[in-house]
Image (tube, rainbow, N blue to C red):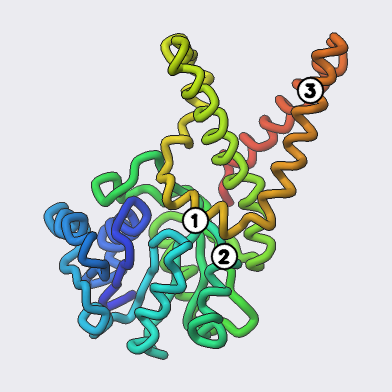
Amino acid sequence: MFERLCIIGVGLIGGSIAKAARAEGLCKQVVALGREKNLPNMQRAVELGVIDAFYTDPAQAMAGTDCVIICTPVGSMQAIFEQLKPYWNSQTLYSDAGSTKGSVVEAARAVFGKVPSNFVPAHPIAGAERSGVEAAKVDLYKNRRLILTPLSSTDPRAVDQFNAFWRRIGSSVAIMSVEHHDTVLAATSHLPHILAFALVGMLGRKDEQREIFKYAAGGFRDFSRIASSDPTMWQDICLANKQEIIPLIQQFQAELNQVEHLLQNGDASALFETFSYAKQARQRFLEIFDDPT
């Protein structure tokens, strides 16, 4: 499919893309572009066979490259576009793997004046608590959803090629608007991460005086798992999508206030209804999750 794939940001996400693309024969060569401070990670990526070569000079990285996927935190997107701008090639396909799409589109507009037609914003709905290239998995995207958010100006042929690329590595591809993506992901991904970070932070401060974590059960481990995610990445995500996240935090606060009110009044019936509805809603989620089509 591609002669040379360039990954910018060879961590869990970028490394897993590289591994999957190589395994499926979707490119002849995989290279990485990164900064001097990331040299040890890129060297490790070569040692692990994730990439064939790496560069800190964008001119060298872009030479002969016909596909570029940016896998850095969303807060760095504008700097990456500025770095790529002198070498941007109309014959090359570009995409990203950011968890917010509005901020990525705005970063592209800030640098190029408009979103280039050969750039297709994308978001693979996959991840893990661990980060770095050593956490990369060849099957990270199998049976997972991948969202493409092309604009009206995006070249349909570029969309088709990335659609085919992600399907080949096992993803179920959906196409939606930038705005809809950010609204949906704020509720299903961004808010849950904030809740996990907040709860673990609160209990962590309590644990300094009492043995809270020592007696935490499996439910705490399940709920708190995502609090092990990369803080830098999630700082960028939350700031980039705060206009969608803040109203959800306010709604969640209202829900907690309602539960507090039921507890104070000893309203067992209403509390049971609240918990029962949540259980049924989660069951619907599980039925959908088991069928990613």
Dot 1 lies on which element?
Answer: helix
Left or right relative to 114: residue 170? left
Which residue type does callout 3 highlight?
A: Val
Q: Is residue 49 visible?
A: no
Q: Position of residue 163 (x, y in %)?
A: 49, 68
Q: Where is residue 282 in the image (x, y as percent from the top left)?
A: 67, 31
Q: Can residue 243 be seen in this view?
A: yes
Dot 2 lies on which element?
Answer: loop
The residue that mark 1 highlights is: 236
Query: Few, some or many C-alpha atoms within 10 Å of disc 2 (few <14, some 14-19, many ≥20)?
Result: many
Q: Which badge, 2 or 3, comes first in the chain's sequence?
A: 2
Quote the CA–CA distance across marks 2 and 1: 12 Å
**Quadrant location, the N terminus:** bottom left
Q: In the rendering, which numbered label is found on residue 101?
A: 2
Which residue type does callout 2 highlight?
A: Lys
Depth order, front residue of 265/142: 265
Quote the CA–CA distance across marks 2 and 3: 34 Å
Q: How many marks do you count on the picture?
A: 3
Which residue type does callout 1 highlight?
A: Asp
Left or right relative to 22: residue 251? right
Q: Position of residue 60 (x, y in %)?
A: 20, 81
201 relative to 68, above or below: above
The residue that mark 3 highlights is: 259
Query: Few, some or many C-alpha atoms within 10 Å of disc 1 (few <14, some 14-19, many ≥20)?
Result: some
Quote the CA–CA distance across marks 1 and 3: 31 Å
Q: Residue at coordinates 56% horizontally, 73% vertically from top-left?
A: 105
